[in-house]
Image (cartoon, rainbow, N blue to C red):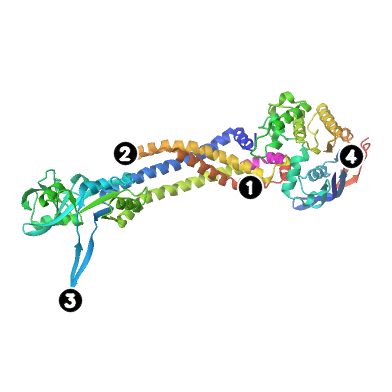
């Protein structure tokens, strides 16, 4: 479904060019739950950003459903992010001046056409699904970290994405809340959603079907779920 | 909820910043509107005052010039079919044109030659009120004639005819008293005797006749050619001529005021637009996180561009309303303070209000183009670093 081939990415730092990813290849099947793990600065977030098309690779190719995304224009990639891909982040993933419901509906506010009733209905369903039906009118500032993360997940669900990219989704949460979020991601995966998650929490990484380990910009080994044990 | 919700919510999110920006731009709009209104009124008032310094149109009977020569000997030119204009009908026709509001004064004249004290002199019959309306520069020793048997004598004519103040003289067999001597004007009036047109018409037995009519028209609202054309249409048998040099001189004075106002307005506008641009630039830098979130949700560069432009546009439209109303009110105060209104006051126009909203909305959008373009150019990856 999603296939990265020999991906290379370099960043300029203090006048020198630092390679972050060195010819990394990874293949993600439809409906799979993949964890990307590694030490800080190993390049796991960069890989997730490249897979989710938020960052373009310097070299290598990225395929989605057999289409080479590396050659696609910005507008095509936008369309992909509008429909098929969703990304949730560790922090600040909601617009603070929009209510929970409005944040969930953000993907539908791209034009002058008003958000239709069906979308609003679906947003309510998604908020219900993540346990926030009663907080639809609240501003993100009045929610806990876990609740904010659940709004981001609801926003991913509302547009019926095929792949959910999660960058340290539990990184800023306490253990109990982190568990809830992971439980939610597992549920969604069981329902058929492809999940690609970056984490440094061994326990959460093991919830995935497959763990990809990155070390100094290289995939050290396609680790199995017992890697952290 | 649609894309407009995002900029509107942003405006609400930063009330103090938005209010400050609105205040600055509204003050700019207010100054421009006030300047525009004041320049219009001052221009109108100035032109009205200038019309008292002479007419800018002459209406005379249609004539044909014939060069007379015989056997190679040129005997000069003669006017064929010289008629007079009927005063009442001609003035009524002038006052009935579509642009009649632009007619400031109509001064009929009857001219004839006669002998006074055995010296040839031109007699000019005028309507004193109308004549003084277009010749405010006249200064008189003595008084303007107030009775039918009183005359006003030009300075050169007075010297030539030996007429002094309160002297009695006989003109066309009738007694007249010199009520005033005109100070030297440097014009034709210095060499003539002026009297009431009714008296001269009776003396010459040419009731209702005029030799020509001088018209003072206001030209700032429309070209003089339009007024001339409309009078020609009403008076097909008359010759209507615009004194272009007078018109141009006056328009130059009026336009100077308007050009000055326009120049100051442009400076204010550029300053206010720069403030909007700076504010939007800082907004783009502050909101890289928001840009990152929106880009991750599939918002394209064009949509980010539109969001920032719309935000500026809203401020512009709102400033247009506040500034127009404020400027309109301020123009009254300014005219009152400068004692310039001269009976003319600014006129409120809904069309102008809508136009101000559209123009200033457009200007703020133009001012926001660069910041919006910069915001749209932020790559999701760069924005994500901000996250």
> Which percent across, then down, holds residue B267?
47, 48
Callout 1 touching callout 3 (CB < 8 Å): no
Please identify, in this view, whether the residue under mark 1 or under mark 3 is nearer the observer.
Answer: 3
- How far apart in space, not on screen, are marks 4 and 3 (Cα)? 124 Å
Whole-percent x, y for residue B98 in the image: 34, 46
As drawn, the label of residue B343 is 2
Q: What residue range appears in magenta?
A: B282-294
Residue designated by label 1: B373
- Main SS type for the magenta part? helix
Would you say residue A130 is visible in this rendering? Answer: no
Q: Which chain letter goes with mark 4? A: A
Q: Residue furthest top?
A: A134
Chain identity of mark 3: B
Query: x, y percentage for residue B52?
Result: 26, 48
Q: Using the image as rendered, state which of residue A76 and residue B324 is in the foreground.
A: A76
Q: Is residue A21 left or right of residue B235?
A: right
Q: Is residue B214 magenta?
A: no
Label located before the other in sequence (2 or 3) = 3
Residue topped by disc 4: A211
Mark 1 vs mark 2: in front: 2
- How far apart are labels 1 and 3 at the CA level? 86 Å
Image marks 4 and 1: residues in contact by CB distance under 8 Å:
no
């Amino acid at each position: 479904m999603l296939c990265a081939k020999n991906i290379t990415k370099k960043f300029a730092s203090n006048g020198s060019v630092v390679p972050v990813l060195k010819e990394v290849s990874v293949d993600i099947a439809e409906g799979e739950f993949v964890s990307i793990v590694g030490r800080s600065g190993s390049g796991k977030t960069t890989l997730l950003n490249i897979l989710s098309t938020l960052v373009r690779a310097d070299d290598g190719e990225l395929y989605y459903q057999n289409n080479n995304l590396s050659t696609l224009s910005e507008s095509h990639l936008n369309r992909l992010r509008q429909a098929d891909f969703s990304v949730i982040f560790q922090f600040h993933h909601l617009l603070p001046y929009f209510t929970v419901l409005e944040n969930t509906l953000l993907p539908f506010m791209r034009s002058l056409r008003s958000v239709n009733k069906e979308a609003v209905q679906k947003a309510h369903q998604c908020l219900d699904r993540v346990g926030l039906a009663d907080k639809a009118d609240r501003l993100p500032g009045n929610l806990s970290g876990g609740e904010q993360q659940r709004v981001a997940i609801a926003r991913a669900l509302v547009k019926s994405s095929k792949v959910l990219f999660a960058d340290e989704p539990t990184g800023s949460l306490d253990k109990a809340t982190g568990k809830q979020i992971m439980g939610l991601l597992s549920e969604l995966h069981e329902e058929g959603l492809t999940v690609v998650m970056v984490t440094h929490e061994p326990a959460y990484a093991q919830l995935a079907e497959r763990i990809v380990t990155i070390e100094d910009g290289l995939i050290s080994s396609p680790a199995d779920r017992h890697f952290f044990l | 909820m649609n894309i407009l919700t995002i900029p509107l919510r942003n405006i609400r999110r930063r009330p103090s910043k938005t209010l400050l920006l609105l205040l600055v731009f509204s003050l700019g709009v207010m100054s421009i509107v006030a300047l525009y209104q004041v320049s219009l009124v001052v221009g109108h008032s100035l032109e009205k005052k200038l019309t008292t310094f002479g007419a800018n149109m002459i209406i005379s009977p249609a004539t044909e010039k014939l060069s007379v020569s015989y056997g190679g000997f040129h005997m000069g030119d003669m006017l064929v079919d010289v008629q007079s204009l009927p005063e009442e009908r001609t003035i009524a026709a002038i006052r009935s044109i579509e642009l009649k509001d632009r007619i400031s004064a109509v001064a009929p004249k009857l001219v004839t030659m006669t002998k006074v004290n055995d010296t040839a002199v031109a007699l000019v019959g005028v309507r004193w009120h109308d004549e003084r309306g277009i010749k405010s520069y006249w200064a008189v020793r003595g008084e303007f004639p107030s009775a039918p048997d009183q005359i006003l004598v030009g300075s050169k004519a007075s010297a030539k005819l030996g007429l002094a103040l309160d002297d009695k003289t006989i003109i066309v067999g009738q007694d007249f008293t010199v009520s005033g001597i005109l100070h030297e004007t440097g014009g034709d009036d210095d060499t003539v005797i002026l009297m009431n047109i009714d008296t001269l018409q009776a003396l010459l037995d040419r009731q209702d006749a005029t030799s020509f009519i001088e018209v003072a028209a206001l030209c700032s609202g429309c070209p003089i050619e339009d007024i001339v054309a409309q009078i020609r249409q009403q008076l097909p048998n008359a010759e209507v001529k615009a004194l272009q040099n007078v018109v141009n001189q006056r328009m130059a004075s009026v336009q100077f005021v308007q050009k000055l106002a326009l120049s100051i307005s442009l400076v204010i506008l550029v300053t206010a637009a720069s403030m909007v641009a700076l504010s939007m630039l800082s907004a783009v830098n502050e909101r890289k996180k928001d840009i990152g979130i929106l880009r991750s949700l599939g918002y394209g560069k064009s949509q980010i561009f539109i969001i920032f432009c719309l935000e500026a546009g809203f401020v512009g439209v709102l400033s247009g309303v506040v500034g127009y109303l404020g400027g309109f009110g301020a123009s009254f105060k300014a005219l009152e303070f400068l004692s310039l209104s001269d009976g003319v006051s600014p006129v409120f126009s809904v069309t102008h209000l809508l136009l101000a909203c559209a123009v200033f909305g457009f200007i703020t959008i133009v001012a926001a183009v660069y910041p919006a373009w910069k915001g749209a150019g932020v790559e999701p990856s760069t924005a994500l670093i901000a996250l």
